[in-house]
Amino acid sequence: MEAISLGSVTKTYRTGVGRARVREMLPPPVDRLVARAAPRWWAKNTFNALDDVSLSIARGSSVGLVGHNGAGKTTMLKVIAGVTAPTSGRVRATGRVSALIDVVVGLHPDLTGRENVYLFGAMHGLGRRAMRERMDRVIDFAEIDELIDTPLKRCSAGMITRIGFAAITALDPEVLLVDEVLAVGDAAFQRKCAAWLERYRTTGGTLLFVSHNLGLVRSMTERAVWMDHGRIVDEGDTASILSEYARAMERREPSDALHGKRMRQQVSTLMKKRGLHRWGMGGARLDEVHVGEVSKGQDEIDIRIAFEVSDIDRAIFCVGFVDESGREIGAAASMALPVHRPGGEITCTIQPLPLSSGIYFPLVAILSEDGIIRDRWQLDRAIVIERNGDGTLPEGFGPVTIPAAWSRDAGEAR
């Protein structure tokens, strides 16, 4: 039986200002009449966040949504939850649907945490008495009893997330929509939320889960849907979809996901801005990183680094890897090498490649001789490692393969 069903759903948004505001002010059914009379004018300065999407999710299943920023994942959750209406198409969700799409959606900053729990319950059809009976569960899960009567505007994003997620756990939802909220909050609370989601999933709840943490998607879902520019590229079991998605990230050509899957021998990754995955003290920068292709069964990888320097004469280069759960699993470091202005290139060859089967993100850094990080960059592209099974461990033994020699006592040899 289907818990969620989408039929040819399109959600169109407008960009810019000016005439777009005039179109938005037209009330129904006048807007539909104008759209039919002047379709080209009506469609000007618009884009489809969802583009003719059809999807069925069975009751009791756990499904992950993956895709680049802007792929339409959050829009899909909002359409299913009823936060926004589709421009066209059909959406149906059966049972009590609860959504935690953003830490502020459904919560009012001027109300206290306790009042927001009552408000949250009312939005899901539960009265004040029903929520009062659940209030102790909310407070125990959130672990912020001393702040439950404080207005949310005085709380941090992590505290607000605690209240929002704790309220969700008390609603006993039949369908749960979760969008990247586990990225907010401390590690202990993230583990607690993940454990609750695992219990919810195994006891028959329907879970639609969005996260850029591929390891979390792999562990929390049994099926995955890969989205790209508002469309569904592919869907199937989580392991196979994540591998295909990671290979598309490796090629760094998101638009190709809908137009075939072309392979390249080398991928050039360029990013000039700094942010969550890039930081450093300056004085030297990683200008360009080329990551060689890793074929199935290959035990070697070349990473070529173009760099610039301005105020250091010797540098230490590091190449490491981050797994799909976001854990840094080790790095190779060079000796302190002389560098000359304005910069140059250096190649790191890792052989044998000590990684087990999985998805990994390269991490490259340049340090001064005193150990200060001048530029550190976790690349967005992914590397997919597939082992043949000859002497490699199955899942559950960690991401790194440790080389070793094995011998038996001569008397036991057969």
Image: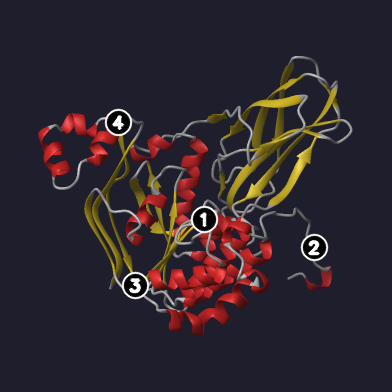
Task: Estimate the x, y position of residue 109 in percent, counting from the top left.
Answer: 53, 58
For marks 3 and 1, the one nearer the N-term is 3
Q: In the drawing, what numbered circle is on residue 45?
A: 4
Tag 3 secondary structure: loop
Seen at 57% across and 46% down, the residue is 297
Task: Estimate the x, y position of residue 305 in percent, counting from the top left.
Answer: 68, 27
Task: Estimate the x, y position of residue 350 in percent, counting from the top left.
Answer: 71, 38
- In the picture, measured across the screen, residue 53 lies left or right of residue 120, that is left
Tag 1 secondary structure: loop
**Residue in the foreground of this view, choosing between 234 and 351:** 234
Q: Are marks 3 and 1 in contact (CB under 8 Å)?
A: no
For marks 1 and 2, the one nearer the N-term is 1
The residue under label 1 is 180
Query: Is residue 136 something that shows in the picture?
Result: yes
Distance from label 3 to label 1 (Cα)?
Answer: 22 Å
How busy is the neighbourhood of tag 1: few (under 14 within 10 Å), some, or many (20 plus)?
some
For marks 2 and 3, the one nearer the N-term is 3
Tag 2 secondary structure: loop
